[in-house]
Image (spheres, rainbow, N blue to C red):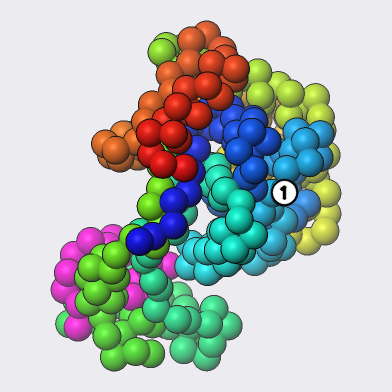
Amino acid sequence: MPAKILVISGPTASGKTRLAVELALRHNGEVVSADSMQVYRRMDIGTAKPTAGEMRGVPHHMLDVADPEEDFSVARYVAMASRCVDGILARGRLPILAGGTGLYLDSLLSGRTFAAFDGASPLRAQLEARIRAQGGTALLAELAQVDPQAAGRLHPNDEKRIVRALEVYLSTGKTITQHNRETQALPPRYDALTITLSFQRREDMWARIDRRVDEMMDRGLAGEVQALLDSGVPDRCTAMQAIGYKEMAAALRGDGDTAAAAQEIKLRSRQYAKRQLTWFRRNRAARQLVWGPSPDFAAGLQASTEYMEEFGI
């Protein structure tokens, strides 16, 4: 039987980290972050990475495990995070996954595997050079000859996925469609109780997001982004496409209007929260914690503990 673990999911600024810490303190747990941007070092303010004070002595994993220049993937996350979870279980403690990156959570829990690849391999470099020279349409047509299903899902502008699909086929002899079909048949890696946080009123969630962005600005978000740019982190790398960093970098390289950038960050964060809510609604087995105007962590701790008892954790 898969080991039982706990997942705290939900949109940005909904209190996932705080609730996870409260539950870890009560139930002998350790927290594993499921946030695609908190993996990066030197990106603390804009990712709302928990401080030492907010962790309250609870061990946290999958924070600061990559440099901003690296192209961190879901495959790498699953490989690293599964080792963290298994280590926590081996210590007789409760793994608590906490984060809002639904793809990371789903991939880790499902037991999905990923075709091995090396981002620095000659094959990857060759395919990237070809797509720059020939364009996405040409390589998408080539992909359609061997994997029409994958090609049918992709747009010619989705160069990264076109390259990846061709790379999988050319390096393994197996299409990415076949690989995905085989991995979907695998049993789940863990037996997870998922608790999803949300708000009764969208307006309360928007206000909480806005306050968080204001706090980020007060803590020095503009300075953090400027330091990344000054250190040579490229504008176009994955880390700098994160909400908060992309908008602030554009302002700092442009007219310097950081106040306008903050307003743009609020808008993009609200849009992202809506997408997160849509993603998490797909999990019909998840238990719901719905906040009023602001999170009530005492009530949330009690309700979560009751859910855990029912689930057998």
Query: What secondary structure predominates along the stretch shown in magenta?
Result: helix
Magenta region = 146-165
> Quadrant of the rendered structure where residue 113 is?
bottom left
The verdict on residue 164 being magenta is yes
Residue 207 visible in this rendered orientation of the protein? no
Q: Residue at x 48, y 67 (%)?
A: 75
* Above-or-below relation of 249 to 209: below
The verdict on residue 160 being magenta is yes
What residue sits right under mark 1 in the picture? 59
- Residue 5 appears left or right of 261: left
- Is residue 216 or residue 64 the one in the foreground? 64
Q: Residue at x 72, y 49 (%)?
A: 59
Q: Residues within 10 Å of mark 1 (few under 14, many from 20)?
A: some
- Report x, y in % for residue 82: 52, 64
- Residue 245 appears left or right of 97: right
> Quadrant of the rendered structure where residue 217 is?
top right
- The N terminus sits in image quarter: bottom left
- Report x, y in % for residue 248: 68, 38
- Is residue 60 or residue 220 the one in the foreground? 60
* Above-or-below relation of 275 to 227: above
Numbered label tally: 1
- Residue 225 appears left or right of 241: right
* Above-or-below relation of 87 to 96: below
> Quadrant of the rendered structure where residue 263 is?
top right
Residue furthest to the top? 293
- Report x, y in % for residue 208: 58, 18
Residue 281 visible in this rendered orientation of the protein? yes
Q: Residue at x 48, y 10 (%)?
A: 292
Q: Residue at x 29, y 38 (%)?
A: 285
- Report x, y in % for residue 40: 68, 55
